[in-house]
């Protein structure tokens, strides 16, 4: 009887103690409250995409009218450009029968004074996953530069909604028969470097490209596709001095790359903030004063790092934020190199259980402090609890 009870107790402790302990100690405070007007594009698990605007850390606008939102950028003080994706039952290109469902993606310009859509541009995709427009940049005069993952292209849309320029990645990479049927390259970001030159992120090749209008690809970062340099990255930013700041997502770090002898090499990286390791960070913006704004997706937070790498503040957001922008401060070409930091917090993961955790974060929004080690401990605890409970049941049955 005592043995069975002991086994039962150990099992319960293995399930409960790590979860309670981590939940109780989660959320290390930082010394200051968030400041400024901050917009966050939230991909969200399931269909909970939204745009949220904070004023000095207080939520002042929330719009949740799409399956997902991704990049957000301020057009002016009252208008916010956001990329989004949603379902639709009005299919023309892909619908084979009346009533077929497909998806739509594109961008919206949101009037933040009235929380209304001032402009929308959209097109159909075959499915939602891996076909969304992740990034768009306002060019002025109503023109918008778009990175399209569905057909793996760049395009410019004018004020009337007409496409005035396109570049297809199949001009550089060997393309499958139909890029819309698979997650081929996953072009997830485009930035304007100067007149007619664009920096893009090609997630599935671990590469960044510079595309020039009229010339095509004129520079490649990480030609060898080395996952130690970049691994399924997001949202690169060109800095001063031939440097690049990148959210190196699958390496769970923010990295700075510098051009050396015709190649780009990591010169600085940071993997944690406020005592918590980054988990799938998908945006990093270097501000003019040397601070860095980080969107730490699976930790459901935005972090502002001081120039020395320490956390100035953190802000918890809805589950799975994708991108954040401080009004008047981010999404710019240029910025100083990092001064320090290099905080490392390598995450030890448990194969198999990590996949379960990622699936939970994408579908139901698991708490940010939950790790694959918690799942392993809970699994072992359940097995031990069942063993102890089984023994106790058999002993009580035999005694009766």
Image: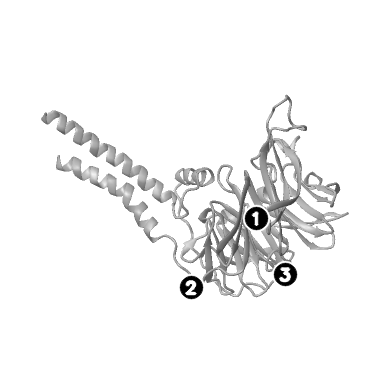
For disc 3, the marked residue is 334
Q: x%, y% of residue 173?
A: 76, 46
Outermost residue on the top side: it is 97
Q: Say which mark, if any, is on residue 31.
A: 2
Disc 3 versus disc 1: distance between alpha carbons?
A: 17 Å
Closer to the camera in the image, 100 or 200: 100
Q: Are marks 2 and 3 in contact (CB under 8 Å)?
A: no
| Disc 3 secondary structure class | loop
The residue lying at 41 percent from left, 50 percent from top is 373
For disc 1, the marked residue is 234
Disc with the residue nearer the chain's start (2 vs 3): 2
On the question of residue 369 being in view, the answer is yes
Looking at the rendering, in which quadrant would you find the N terminus?
top left
The residue lying at 31 percent from left, 48 percent from top is 14
- Give the mark toward the camera: 1 or 2: 2
112 vs 319, left or right, is right
Q: Say which mark, if any, is on residue 185.
A: none
Q: x%, y% of residue 338?
A: 62, 72
User: For residue 152, what is the image quadrant?
Assistant: top right
The residue lying at 69 percent from left, 54 percent from top is 207
25 vs 146, left or right, is left
Label 2 neighbour load within 10 Å: few <14, some 14-19, many 20+: few
Disc with the residue nearer the chain's start (1 vs 2): 2
The residue lying at 69 percent from left, 32 percent from top is 89
- Give the mark toward the camera: 2 or 3: 2
Q: x%, y% of residue 245?
A: 66, 64
Disc with the residue nearer the chain's start (3 vs 1): 1
Disc 2 versus disc 3: distance between alpha carbons?
A: 28 Å
**Where 292 falls versus 61 (above or below)?**
below
């Amino acid at each position: 009887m005592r043995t069975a009870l002991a086994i039962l107790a150990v099992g319960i402790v293995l399930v409960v103690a790590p979860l309670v302990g981590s939940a109780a100690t989660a959320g290390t405070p930082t010394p200051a409250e968030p400041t400024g007007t901050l917009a966050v594009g939230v991909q969200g698990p399931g269909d909970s995409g939204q745009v949220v605007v904070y004023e000095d850390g207080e939520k002042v606008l929330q719009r949740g009218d799409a399956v997902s939102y991704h990049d957000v950028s301020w057009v002016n003080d009252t208008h916010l450009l956001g990329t989004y994706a949603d379902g639709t039952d009005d299919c023309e290109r892909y619908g084979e029968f009346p009533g077929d469902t497909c998806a739509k993606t594109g961008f919206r310009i949101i009037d933040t004074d009235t929380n209304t859509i001032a402009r929308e541009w959209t097109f159909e995709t075959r499915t939602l996953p891996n076909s969304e427009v992740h990034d768009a940049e306002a060019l002025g005069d109503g023109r918008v530069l778009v990175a399209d993952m569905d057909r793996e292209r760049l395009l410019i849309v004018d004020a009337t909604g007409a496409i005035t320029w396109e570049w297809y990645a199949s001009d550089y990479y060997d393309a499958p028969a139909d890029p819309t049927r698979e997650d081929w390259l996953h072009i997830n970001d485009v930035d304007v470097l100067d007149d007619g030159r664009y920096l893009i992120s090609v997630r599935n090749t671990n590469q960044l490209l510079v595309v020039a209008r009229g010339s095509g690809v004129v520079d490649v970062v990480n030609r060898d596709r080395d996952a130690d340099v970049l691994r399924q990255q997001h949202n690169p930013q060109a800095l001063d001095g031939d440097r690049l700041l990148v959210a190196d997502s699958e390496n769970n770090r923010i990295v700075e790359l510098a051009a050396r002898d015709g190649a780009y090499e990591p010169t600085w990286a940071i993997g944690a903030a406020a005592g918590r390791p980054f988990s799938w960070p998908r945006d990093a913006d270097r501000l003019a004063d040397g601070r860095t704004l980080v969107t730490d997706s699976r930790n459901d937070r935005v972090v502002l790092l001081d120039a020395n790498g320490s956390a100035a503040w953190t802000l918890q957001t809805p589950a799975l934020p994708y991108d954040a922008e401080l009004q008047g401060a981010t999404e710019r070409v240029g910025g100083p190199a990092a001064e320090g930091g290099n905080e490392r917090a390598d995450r030890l993961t448990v194969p198999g259980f990590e996949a379960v955790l990622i699936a939970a974060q994408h579908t139901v929004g698991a708490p940010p402090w939950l790790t694959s080690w918690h799942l392993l401990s809970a699994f072992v605890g359940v097995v031990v609890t069942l063993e102890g409970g089984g023994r106790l049941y058999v002993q009580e049955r035999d005694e009766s």
